[in-house]
Image: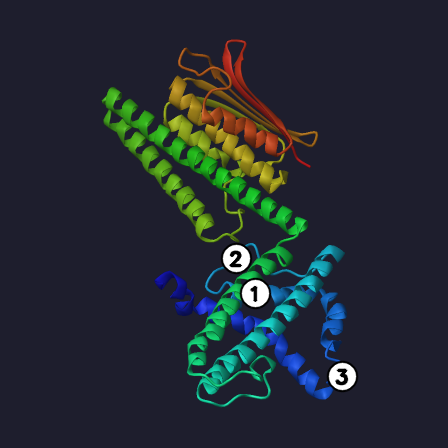
Amino acid sequence: MARFLRPLLRGTTYTRVLHLWVPMLITSVWIFVSPSTPYAPALALIPVALIPAVRIGEGVQAQLLLTPGQQDPSISVAPSTTWRDRGRTLVWLEARMALGWVTTCACVWLPIIAFEFIEVARGRVPDDIPILREAAPNGWYALLAPLPLIALYAALVGLGELATLLARQLLGPSRAERLAALEERTEQLLERTRIARELHDSIGHALTVAVVQAGAARAAGDPEFTERALGAIEETGRAALEDLERVLGVLRETERPVSSRPTLVDADRLLESARASGAKVDAEVTGPLEAVPGPVSREGYRILQESLTNVLRHAGSVPVRVRIRVADNTLDLEIRNPLTAAIPGPGRGSGLRGIRERAALLGGRAYTGPDEGDWQVHAELPLG
């Protein structure tokens, strides 16, 4: 019994009834104006449904009154963009008006019938209700009075559920809207992947430099070298904190531009950090780095950062040759170091995959693996 009466305690039941009553306000006014043409409002809905913005209004009303308190993704709040959308909107408007008529009749006549049952039980037979005109006054009619009220209750709950079901079917997202939502979701996932890669590159580089510097300082036992190592650790840590704050800012502010990310113009910071960690870096830059487009320059910086991190992590303090060349509408990056047994084989490690993925996303290519006794990272990124 409690389950049967539960809809009475839900506000959704009453907002749905209100939603079905709204079209009847205009219809009721029209009947007073022209009682001979009660069908005119239904005909007027045909040109109305062709207006793209009508679908927005119907979607907003459906979400507010049929599914209050929740953003139902199965009910679209977008204008009609195709004739199919307009056709579905028209069917919805006509169905809403029909359900409104049924709801209004139920709300008016079922309580009246319940009242008249009581009147018949009291000895007065009504003349305006056909089914009771021939009824003989009898006290047993009082027992029938709750039946119209129960029918009213069931009708209001059922019509509200039916209206919600039709709204989800007829006002639901179109194929184009579902495709747009899927593309947006894909972009969000790609952005999360990019942020995870950013953290891996930046924080991983900083931790690698800090570990190598600390180990070298402990082994050297030289106060002057230890001082330099601590300075390098501090500088690298500060840079990592800046990168971490920037990435967290991107997470907090989805519209924040990525222009604050480091580019190849800041490559000296990476090279000096690697040198301070004991690596003998021979760098050569050819061509104007300032002319490299922002996205390409930022991804190039990350490729260089990940490459130097892998050198320090797997090979230690070894000679490293860095070549950065901007020419022929291409950014060419080459990082080489002597091959050691600790270097991972080609294709393994998230860092190596990240390098190849970055290059592929920009329409370029990257090779990571052994080459003539060296470990080589060679990336070619198109500038346009």
User: Decide: marks 3, 2 in contact (CB < 8 A)?
Assistant: no
Q: Amino acid at mark 2?
A: Asp
Give the residue drawn at x 66%, y 52%: 174
158 and 257: which is toward the camera:
158
Residue 101, given in percent of the width and then of the height, sits at 62, 73
Give the residue drawn at x 65%, y 71%: 97
What residue did someone put label 1 on? 62
Which label was assigned to residue 36?
A: 3
Check disc 3 and report its element: helix, strand or loop: loop
In which quarter of the view is residue 234 placed? top left
Residue 136, given in percent of the width and then of the height, sits at 51, 84
Of the two numbered discs 3 and 1 on the same chain, state the one appearing first in sequence.
3
43 and 270: which is toward the camera:
43
Give the residue drawn at x 50%, y 47%: 260
Instruction: Specify the quadrant that holds the C terminus.
Output: top right
Q: Amino acid at mark 1?
A: Ala
Residue 76 in view here: no
Instruction: Specify the quadrant that holds the N terminus.
Output: bottom left
What residue did someone put label 2 on? 72
Residue 212, given in percent of the width and then of the height, sits at 33, 25
Of the two numbered discs 3 and 2 on the same chain, state the one appearing first in sequence.
3
Colour scheme in the image? rainbow
